[in-house]
Image (spheres, rainbow, N blue to C red):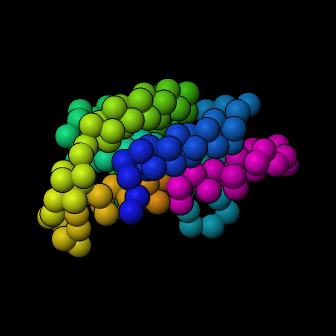
Amino acid sequence: MITATDMTTMLAQNLRVIGLQTEGLTHSDSMLQLPFRGNCLNWVLGHMLVSRDYMLRIAGAETLWDAEKSAPYMFGSEAMTAEADAVPMESILADLQRSQECLAEAMTALDDGTLDAPFENERDDTLRKRLAFMTWHDSYHTGQTEYLRQLSGVGDKVI
């Protein structure tokens, strides 16, 4: 059974990879668009923060971003193409770091009874299953950062 500590560790590993994948990139680099339907690095990073905020909320903690700031990064939002509409990449990265600290605190405070309690959503999960899914979701998007880094033309391999 996956524990809150396991999930927190995985999220920390993802954040380390994100740091490596964004090292040396600019905000403008984060706005580069794929040549096919998809989202830019800036959107992926912001979406990850919005998803981590959801994890914070369901774990009983305060979120970092409000609904207005989150809206452009929500699932199903329009492709982000204008730099002026985007949160600066450096701010997103700083907020991801803060989210990691908040998640570590919130999730380690959850006991097994709370984690295994029913969590009412479209899947009727337990809180543990929902947080585990969101941890997987975070890893999914972390993997995308490798390819989105390459749009800037660096041509390197960081992991």
* View extreme (right): residue: 155
The residue shown at (38%, 52%) is: 3
The residue shown at (70%, 55%) is: 147
Evaluate whether residue 38 shows in this view: yes
Give the camera-side residue of 36 and 121: 121
Give the camera-side residue of 64 and 131: 131
> Is 13 situated left or right of 69 in this image?
right
Q: Position of residue 97 (x, y in %)?
A: 48, 30
Bounds of the magenta span? 139-159
Q: Position of residue 26 (x, y in %)?
A: 67, 31
Q: Which quadrant would the N terminus be assigned to in this image?
A: bottom left
Look at the picture and state if 93 lies above or below 118.
above
Q: So how many labels did they put on this image?
A: 0
Residue 146 belongs to magenta span: yes
Residue 119 belongs to magenta span: no
The residue shown at (23%, 35%) is: 61
Evaluate whether residue 78 shows in this view: no
Look at the picture and state if 34 lies above or below 9.
below
> Is 16 situated left or right of 44 in this image?
right
* View extreme (bottom): residue: 123
Q: Position of residue 102 (x, y in %)?
A: 35, 31
Q: Position of residue 146 (x, y in %)?
A: 69, 52
The residue shown at (23%, 33%) is: 62
Look at the picture and state if 5 lies above or below 35.
above
